[in-house]
Image (spheres, helix red, strand yellow):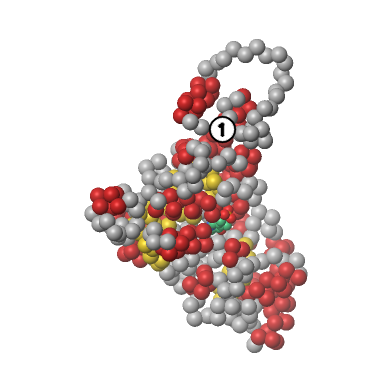
């Protein structure tokens, strides 16, 4: 919408009235070119209703994050949100002028700090920017427990660092990163160097169901969410962007979502998303307690049942999502275990679904166990809303039968 049109919409929304002689209550939809169903960009009555619903959803999401409504950008999902956060900062800041002003010099590229276990939508995006000579990147390796040391992040921050992107919780091993401490280091750096940079972005896609999402408490400037990891949410996502972050759009198009995410909003899915997010927020504490108990039971029983088979737990056992169990059996390929479990009706995973078509093993497990055979990987069980104790018991029974069978082959 152009500025004039949105001003007009605003008038309609705030009570400016036009006299319309109504013939009957029938509505005739002659705006199929705008969108085959009412769309929030239209200024007719149905468009305004759609717009109100969209703004309601935005408010609902901002309530959960503790942000302002206008800091919420609806996207198509987590991948797009992460791309917008990273590329949107880079496309603005390589401007030599801004770098010279910051005393960096004309030829320095903007610099990003991230870790080696980020989701591909962060890690590959950073690598692409580096290959295309649009950015420099520093990839900080996590410790053997799958957690990054905040001091190592701080050490990588330079004059031209514009962004630090650290995931909240990992999708394969469930480890939770010390975001608050990283935020503290960054604030300290900014203060000492009298600069607004770097900004802190977090991919919170896996954290949404169990962890605190309040952006003020976390101290983050941008945060990505995805409906694909929230039960009942639509396939849309959210990027929270603090008002002061100088982000630019990465797609050319209309001025939806504050100009940062052009294209007709997916209203039906956005409404499902905000509803599901509210529900998840309401049940968070209870569900976290329930799953922590269930997961610990799973681990305890597994440990006794698997005493004859060498197995290693992946990722820190304290600072991890309550629903995640990830085990490496040093001699048995995880892929084979997934197939064996599947034949017994149990759906587990051997690496992130996003990379499962590549022939390499998991880069996350490799980051934790550089000396292990990359083919072996890790077996991931992720519990959720519908997981019951009897499911866990059946899984333990099945897994120990499978391992008894496979032991003969692999040991
Ligand atoms: C699934 C996932 C994404 C990608 O989200 P999509 O909505 O599938 O694009 C990003 N980050 C993490 C940590 C994820 O688990």
What residue is shown at x 38% (from left), y 49% (from top)?
92
What residue is shown at x 73% (from left), y 69% (from top)?
342
Of 35 and 407, nearer the camera is 35
Residue 384 in the figure: left or right of residue 106: right
Of 382 and 112, nearer the camera is 112
Q: Quadrant of the C terminus?
A: bottom right
Q: Position of residue 368 (x, y in %)?
A: 49, 73
Residue 42 in the figure: left or right of residue 145: right
Q: Position of residue 323 (x, y in %)?
A: 59, 60
The answer to whether one can see residue 397 in this image is: no
Q: Which residue is mark 1?
A: 41
Q: Is residue 242 above or below residue 28?
A: below
Of 142 and 130, nearer the camera is 130
What residue is shown at x 67% (from left), y 14% (from top)?
22
For disc 1, the neighbor class at 10 Å (few under 14, some 14 to 19, many from 20) is: many
Q: Is residue 255 above or below residue 160?
A: above
What residue is shown at x 66% (from left), y 47% (from top)?
232
Q: Is residue 230 above or below residue 405?
A: above
Residue 242 lies in quadrant = top left
Under circle 1, the secondary element is: loop
Q: Is residue 371 above or below residue 222?
A: below
Q: Position of residue 379 (x, y in %)?
A: 62, 71
Residue 405 in the figure: left or right of residue 358: right
- Quadrant of picture, ligand 1: bottom right
Q: Position of residue 125 (x, y in %)?
A: 47, 59
């Amino acid at each position: 919408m152009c500025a004039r049109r949105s001003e007009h919409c605003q008038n309609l929304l705030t009570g400016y009235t036009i006299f319309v002689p109504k013939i009957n209550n029938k509505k005739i939809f002659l705006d199929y070119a705008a969108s085959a169903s009412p769309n929030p960009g239209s200024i007719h009555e149905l468009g305004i209703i759609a717009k109100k619903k969209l703004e309601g959803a935005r408010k609902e999401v901002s309530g959960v994050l503790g942000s302002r409504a206008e800091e919420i950008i609806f996207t198509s999902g987590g991948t797009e949100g992460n791309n917008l956060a990273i590329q949107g900062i880079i496309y603005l800041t390589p401007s030599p002028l801004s770098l010279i002003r910051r005393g960096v010099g004309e030829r320095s590229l903007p610099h990003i700090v991230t870790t080696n276990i980020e989701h591909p939508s962060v890690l590959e995006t950073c690598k692409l920017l580096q290959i295309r000579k649009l950015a420099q990147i520093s990839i900080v390796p996590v410790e053997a427990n799958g957690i990054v040391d905040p001091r190592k992040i701080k050490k990588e921050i330079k004059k031209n660092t514009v962004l630090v992107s650290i995931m909240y919780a990992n999708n394969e091993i469930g480890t939770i990163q010390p975001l608050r401490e990283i935020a503290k280091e960054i604030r300290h750096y900014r203060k000492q160097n009298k600069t607004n940079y770097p900004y802190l972005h977090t991919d919170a896609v896996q954290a949404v169901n169990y962890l605190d999402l309040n952006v003020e408490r976390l101290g983050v400037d941008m945060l990505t969410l995805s409906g694909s990891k929230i039960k009942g949410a639509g396939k849309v996502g959210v990027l929270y962007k603090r008002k002061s972050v100088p982000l630019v759009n990465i797609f050319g198009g209309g001025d939806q979502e504050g100009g940062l995410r052009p294209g007709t909003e997916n209203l039906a899915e956005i409404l499902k998303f905000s509803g599901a997010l509210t529900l998840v927020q309401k049940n968070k504490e209870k569900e976290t307690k329930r799953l922590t108990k269930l997961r610990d039971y799973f681990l305890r029983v597994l440990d006794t049942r698997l005493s004859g088979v060498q197995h290693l737990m992946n990722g820190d056992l304290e600072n991890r999502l309550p629903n995640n169990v990830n085990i490496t059996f040093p001699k048995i390929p995880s892929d084979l275990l997934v197939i064996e479990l599947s034949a017994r009706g149990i759906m587990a995973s051997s690496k992130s679904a996003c990379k499962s078509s590549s022939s390499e093993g998991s880069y996350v497990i490799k980051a934790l166990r550089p000396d292990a055979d990359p083919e072996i990987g890790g077996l991931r069980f992720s519990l959720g809303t519908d997981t019951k104790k009897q499911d866990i018991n059946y899984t333990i029974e099945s897994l120990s039968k499978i391992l008894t069978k496979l032991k003969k082959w692999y040991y």
